[in-house]
Amino acid sequence: MTYSISFHYEKNVGLKSDSEEMETVYLRDPITNNPNVYTPTETMLFAMSGCSSYDVLLIISRMRKEIKSFSVKVDAEREEEEPRVLKSANFTYSIDSDISEEQALRAINLSLEKYCSVTILARRGGVKVTYSLVLNGKEICDRKDPKID
């Protein structure tokens, strides 16, 4: 599979994607630093957590389980010195579903260890990725390292 994207700079807006078939994506203008537009690093966090969410939702649906609600919150830390790369990212998955704790943990671990190419790429680049799970309103684990059992 190959990908091709393009974008251009718009003054006071930032970088704007050029695709006519896809939704428009904006990245923050580095000159005006508009706080209402995401930075490239924030967009990377979206990509990491979005990729993993895609996997987790697909795995749960293949288990033939109902998903009542699903959300992810990402807390990340960057290096203080340039190039200020990501040091760590913790994904907090909040899932309301009829899945068991073991099934939820398996879906998350499979995503982070085997399927989510974006997060795996970040991990290979040195980002410490952990996860937390809240299942049906109950905290199951906090800042756990991904591992397939």
Image: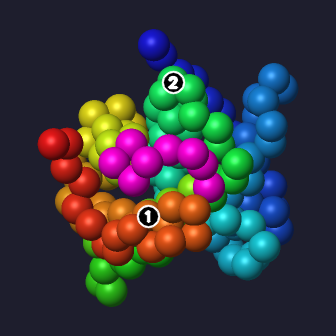
| The N terminus, quarter of image | top left
Which residue is at 81% across, 23% downward? 21
Observer-nearest of 48 and 73: 73
Quadrant position of residue 84: bottom left
Q: How is the image coloured?
A: rainbow
Name the amino acid type tagged 2. Answer: Arg
Residue 102 covered by magenta stretch: yes
- Decide: is 48 above or below 116: below
Disc 2: CA contacts within 10 A as few (<14), some (14-19) or many (>=20): few
Marks 2 and 1, Cα distance to the nearest angstrom?
Answer: 20 Å
Quadrant position of residue 87: bottom left
Instruction: Please give the residue where the numbered disc 1 appears in the rendered image.
Output: 133
Instruction: Please give the residue where the numbered disc 2 appears in the rendered image.
Output: 62
Please indicate, yes or no, whether residue 63 appears anywhere in the rendered image: yes
Please indicate, yes or no, whether residue 119 appears anywhere in the rendered image: no
Say whether residue 30 is left or right of residue 104.
right
Residue 53 in the image, given as x and y percentages of width and height? 53, 45
Residues drawn in magenta: 96-103
Labelled disc at residue 104: none
Q: Are marks 2 and 1 in contact (CB under 8 Å)?
A: no
Say whether residue 22 is left or right of residue 87.
right
Residue 129 in the image, given as x and y percentages of width and height? 30, 61
| The C terminus, quarter of image | top left
